[in-house]
């Protein structure tokens, strides 16, 4: 056996004498504090007006550190070299304690920042910096001095540059009332909560560092060290995901089973919101009677079809949702060719070695990074029926055709944002123009990955440009094409920004209303938070199903 590849042996006798008892004591304090906090949450008469299930869930989450403290304390006491279901191994105990104390320190300092109002002080500090922005010239001068010293290999000049930079920082901080901000921050420590939070953060940070620097005693291998360092780098993103995405996601799932609305505590109604979305009714009646009369109470006409003397009426409890879903599907079906085909043609052109192609690539990508609100304002001007460029271009073209060829084509004077037959196309054109640049870059990357030898072989075999494109380019672009189709489809089914920004007046035309916009309208205009959450989860399942089908079809075609 190669000795260098063997795992180091753990030696807990080399640990400081104080580390284990201090760890166990701190774990006990954290567990008792969490138990007290969980009990306090359950005793609250009103928990954010979210209902008893959320209150019980919050109390259960607060109990998780109790379980973690007991679990890793057991691992530290029993000192098992191998992991088991009930007791962790020595390495797992160390990693668990590191994460445990890292999370405790982060939450403690976040609590201190919130309780002390440090964010307000930071805002005042930034305001002071902006009012004395001219002092930034001092840093520029310091950098120039340091650069000259580096080029001249003069330690004195480099030191002078550092001193000038430090003096500039001091002057900038003094001009921004930094000292007064420090005094105000220190005065917040008269609050016991700020003091306790700071002490707990310092203690947790100290213990985290103590276990972090003692990998040798726990038999840590280089691979294990790289693993926890990688997780440490990912921890800000993971914590942000858990707090700002996973938490609201679970809350919305709970709200989708309630009748939550503004100003009242939600009551669990289970699947009634989903039943309301999926409630349909099909009735027949004579063609001479109004369609609404055939439906039961609470249903409205979604569509009707005349077959001879009989009318088939399709009703729904919420026809507006299904109209918005239809608009979304039609939007997506138009967006796919309008954003993919031109992007593919542009990528083929930009893949050539003509002069200035790098500039053109950047120009075509600019719409993808432009803000939707700003571009929507410009497109509203372009869509104007009186002064818009699109109608002007159409009028000029028709006038030229009528004058040159003697035709009598009528000028349509399209009302892009008010004509019910055109408003959805207006949104599609804006969205396609905006994502076409991103698709072009993706196709261009795929084209540059195709070996030139294949085109040369096809040319030797007598293939022209079209045959080379059909038999070489398209087959090898299938992975890229699949990715582009999936991303465009998901983007189209989630469209919200374009109709929201393109139609400033509310309500927007029903023909321009998409599913996500309808969700927004239910939640933030009618304040039906429970029903809006149910719509959100229904759309998630709808998009997930379509994406899953796409992946299955792609796998079967291989």
Image (cartoon, rainbow, N blue to C red):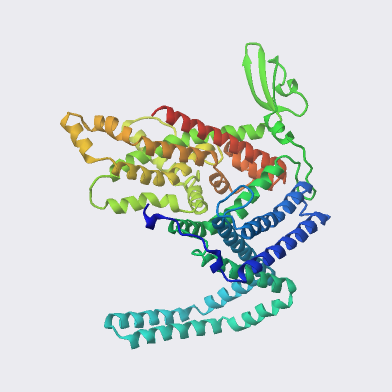
Residue closest to the eye, 22 or 432: 22
Q: From the viewer's perspective, tell me whether residue 491 is left or right of residue 358.
A: right
* Image x and y of residue 332, in percent: 50, 35
Give the residue drawn at x 42%, y 50%.
Answer: 367
Residue closest to the eye, 233 or 365: 233
Say which quarter of the image contains residue 74.
bottom right
- Count of numbered marks: 0
- Say if residue 328 shows up in the picture: yes
- Considering the image in quadrants, where does the C terminus appear? top left
Give the residue drawn at x 30%, y 43%.
Answer: 449
Say which quarter of the image contains residue 69.
bottom right
Residue extending furthest top? 308
- Say if residue 421 shows up in the picture: no
Say which quarter of the image contains residue 456.
top left
Residue extending furthest front? 1
* Image x and y of residue 41, in percent: 78, 56
* Image x and y of residue 485, in percent: 44, 37
Give the residue drawn at x 39%, y 46%.
Answer: 437
Residue closest to the eye, 133 or 17: 17
Q: Is residue 133 above or below residue 110?
A: below
Give the residue drawn at x 68%, y 66%.
Answer: 26
* Image x and y of residue 187, in percent: 69, 80
Q: In this view, does 55 lie above or below 141?
A: above
Q: From the viewer's perspective, tell me whether residue 170 is left or right of residue 504.
A: left
């Amino acid at each position: 056996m190669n000795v260098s590849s063997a795992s180091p042996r753990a030696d807990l006798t080399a640990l400081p004498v104080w580390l284990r008892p201090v760890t166990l004591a701190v774990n006990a304090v954290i567990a008792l504090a969490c138990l007290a906090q969980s009990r306090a949450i359950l005793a609250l008469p009103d928990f954010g007006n979210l209902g008893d299930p959320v209150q019980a869930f919050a109390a259960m989450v607060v109990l998780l550190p109790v379980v973690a403290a007991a679990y890793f304390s057991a691992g530290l006491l029993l000192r098992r070299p191998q992991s088991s279901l009930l007791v962790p191994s020595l390495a797992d105990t160390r990693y668990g304690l590191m994460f445990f104390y890292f999370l405790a320190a982060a939450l403690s300092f976040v609590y201190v920042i919130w309780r002390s109002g440090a964010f307000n002080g930071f805002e005042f500090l930034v305001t002071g910096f902006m009012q004395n922005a001219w002092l930034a010239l001092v840093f520029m001068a310091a950098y120039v001095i340091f650069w000259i010293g580096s080029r001249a290999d003069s330690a004195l000049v480099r030191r002078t540059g550092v001193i000038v930079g430090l003096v500039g920082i001091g002057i900038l901080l003094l001009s921004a009332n930094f000292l007064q901000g420090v005094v105000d921050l220190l005065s917040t420590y008269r609050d016991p909560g700020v003091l306790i939070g700071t002490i707990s953060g310092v203690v947790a940070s100290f213990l985290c560092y103590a276990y972090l620097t003692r990998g040798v005693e726990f038999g840590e291998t280089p691979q294990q060290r790289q693993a926890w360092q990688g997780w440490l780098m990912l921890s800000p993103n993971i914590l942000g995901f858990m707090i700002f995405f996973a938490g609201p996601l679970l809350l919305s799932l709970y709200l989708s089973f309630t009748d939550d609305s503004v100003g009242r505590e939600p009551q669990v109604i289970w699947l009634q919101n989903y039943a309301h979305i999926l409630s349909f009714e099909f009735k027949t009646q004579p063609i001479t009677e109004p369609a609404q009369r055939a439906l039961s109470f609470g249903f409205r006409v979604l569509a009707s079809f005349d077959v001879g003397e009989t009318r088939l009426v399709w009703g729904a409890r919420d026809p507006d949702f299904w109209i918005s879903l239809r608009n979304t599907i039609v939007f997506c079906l138009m967006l796919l060719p309008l954003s993919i085909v031109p992007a593919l043609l542009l990528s083929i052109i930009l893949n050539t070695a003509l002069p200035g192609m790098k500039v053109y690539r950047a120009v075509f990508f600019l719409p993808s990074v432009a803000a939707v609100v700003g571009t929507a304002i410009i497109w509203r001007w372009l869509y104007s029926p009186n002064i818009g460029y699109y109608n002007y271009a159409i009028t000029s073209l028709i006038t030229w055709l009528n004058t040159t060829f003697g035709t009598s084509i009528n000028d349509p004077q399209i009302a892009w944002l008010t004509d019910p037959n055109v408003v959805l196309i207006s949104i599609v054109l804006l969205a396609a123009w905006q994502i076409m640049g991103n698709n072009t870059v993706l196709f261009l990357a795929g084209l540059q990955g195709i070996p030139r030898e294949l085109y040369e072989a096809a040319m030797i075999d007598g293939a022209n440009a079209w045959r080379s494109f059909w038999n070489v380019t398209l087959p090898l672009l299938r992975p890229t094409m699949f990715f582009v189709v999936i991303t465009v489809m998901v983007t189209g089914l989630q469209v919200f920004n374009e109709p929201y920004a393109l139609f400033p007046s509310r309500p927007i035309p029903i023909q321009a209303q998409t599913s996500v916009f309808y969700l927004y309208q239910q939640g933030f205009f009618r304040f039906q938070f429970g029903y809006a959450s149910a719509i959100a989860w229904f759309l998630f399942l709808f998009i997930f199903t379509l994406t899953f089908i796409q992946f299955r079809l792609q796998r079967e075609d291989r």
